[in-house]
């Protein structure tokens, strides 16, 4: 995947800013693309290009500064991110909550305010889950409360609610989530993501859809350049509306990473702006289901084992 970000970051009252983020590739854009932009609302087919973010920002001189963002922006839901210029997940592949449990982007407006040094809040009104073009006449409302008790711990309380199905303004989809992170030592980081979601008449009339997930994360730096990351997760799709089959999924992922400095300025001083790092990552992943859903040659089985190698260049 390739990415280009053009932005003017802001942090003080009366400042205006913007962010434009475009990604291209054969994998991620086809998954994250929003309906009505790079994904067809009729065929649901996406392309190899996506613009996950394009928004304007302004910090109003109210209290400590009330920030507004208007346009298309990445969701606050989930522990994992699309990844790119600002950083990447500890694991190469994405988890079940990221892929099936929550949305990727919003199109609308959001307001963020820091009530105190350790507590901040965010409220948004948007078109809906991954909708650049609206599916119905309803809007989704979401929010986040961030609590940072110490410099090494953080808790995020997330929610979103609204009608999400095409031409249906009444049946509500609601998702509630708690995400936490804890830097226990200079070498060990821990985290978790707990999600519960519900949609009225999501399976059929009179039969609501419910899905829920729990993921745990750990990353340990054995040396300065070498680290190991682990993710364990379980995801229950009771009505089959998120994965296509009523099932319970389990996943276990191990990701070794080795970082190398990219010092192009040693070759030519004019290349100093390209200085950064290369991150080489491997991955070993085991997925399990209580149903036969994984393709193995000409049959379906209840588990799959995958491996991968990934190279990231950041500058």
Image (cartoon, rainbow, N blue to C red):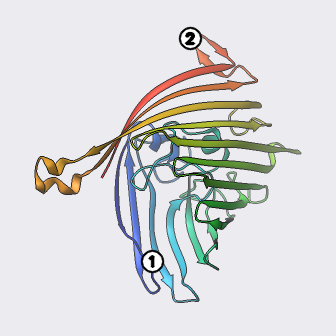
Q: Residue at x 63, y 49 (%)?
A: 191
Which quadrant, please, contains the N terminus? top left
For mark 1, what is the residue? 11
Q: Residue at x 56, y 44 (%)?
A: 42
Q: Residue furthest right?
A: 206
Is 300 or 155 nearer to us in this picture? 155
Front tag of 1 and 2: 1
Name which residue lies at 71% across and 36% down. Answer: 234
Q: Where's residue 70, x and y in %?
A: 51, 71
Q: Is 124 left or right of 132, judged from the image as shown?
A: right
**Residue 5: x and y, percent?**
35, 58
Please indicate whether residue 309 sits to the left or right of residue 93 in the image: left
Rendered image: mark on residue 131: none
Residue 180 in the image: state x and y as whole percent.
Answer: 66, 55
Which is nearer the N-term, disc 1 or disc 2?
Answer: 1
Residue 297: image tag: 2
Asked whether, in this view, residue 95 is left or right of residue 200, the answer is left
Which element carries disc 2, helix, strand or loop?
A: loop
Q: Are marks 1 and 2 in contact (CB under 8 Å)?
A: no
């Amino acid at each position: 995947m390739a990415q280009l970000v053009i932005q003017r970051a802001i942090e003080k009252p009366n400042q205006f800013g913007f962010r434009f983020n475009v990604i291209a590739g054969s994998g991620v854009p086809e998954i994250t693309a929003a309906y009505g932009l790079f994904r067809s609302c009729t065929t649901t087919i996406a392309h190899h290009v996506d613009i996950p973010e394009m928004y304007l920002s302004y910090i109003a001189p109210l209290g400590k500064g009330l920030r507004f963002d208007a346009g298309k922006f990445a969701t606050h839901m989930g522990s994992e991110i699309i990844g790119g210029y600002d950083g990447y997940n500890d694991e190469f592949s994405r988890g079940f909550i990221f892929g099936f449990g929550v949305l990727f982007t919003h199109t609308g407006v959001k307001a963020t305010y820091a009530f105190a040094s350790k507590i901040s809040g965010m409220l948004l009104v948007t078109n809906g889950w991954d909708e650049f073009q609206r599916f119905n006449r309803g809007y989704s409302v979401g929010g986040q409360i961030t609590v940072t008790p110490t410099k090494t711990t953080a808790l995020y309380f997330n929610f979103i609610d609204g009608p999400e199905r095409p031409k249906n303004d009444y049946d509500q989809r609601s998702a509630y989530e708690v995400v936490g992170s804890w830097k226990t030592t200079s070498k060990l980081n821990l985290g978790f993501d707990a999600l519960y979601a519900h949609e009225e008449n999501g399976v059929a009339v009179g039969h609501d859809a419910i899905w829920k997930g729990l993921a745990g994360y750990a990353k340990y730096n054995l040396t300065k350049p070498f680290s190991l990351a682990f993710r364990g997760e379980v995801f229950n799709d009771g009505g089959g509306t998120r994965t296509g089959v009523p099932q319970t999924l389990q996943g276990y992922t191990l990701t070794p990473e080795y970082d190398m400095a990219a010092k192009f300025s040693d070759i030519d001083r004019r290349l100093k702006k390209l200085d950064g790092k290369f991150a080489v990552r491997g991955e070993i992943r085991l997925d399990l289901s209580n149903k036969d859903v994984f393709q193995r040659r000409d049959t379906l089985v209840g588990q799959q084992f995958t491996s991968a190698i990934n190279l990231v260049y950041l500058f």
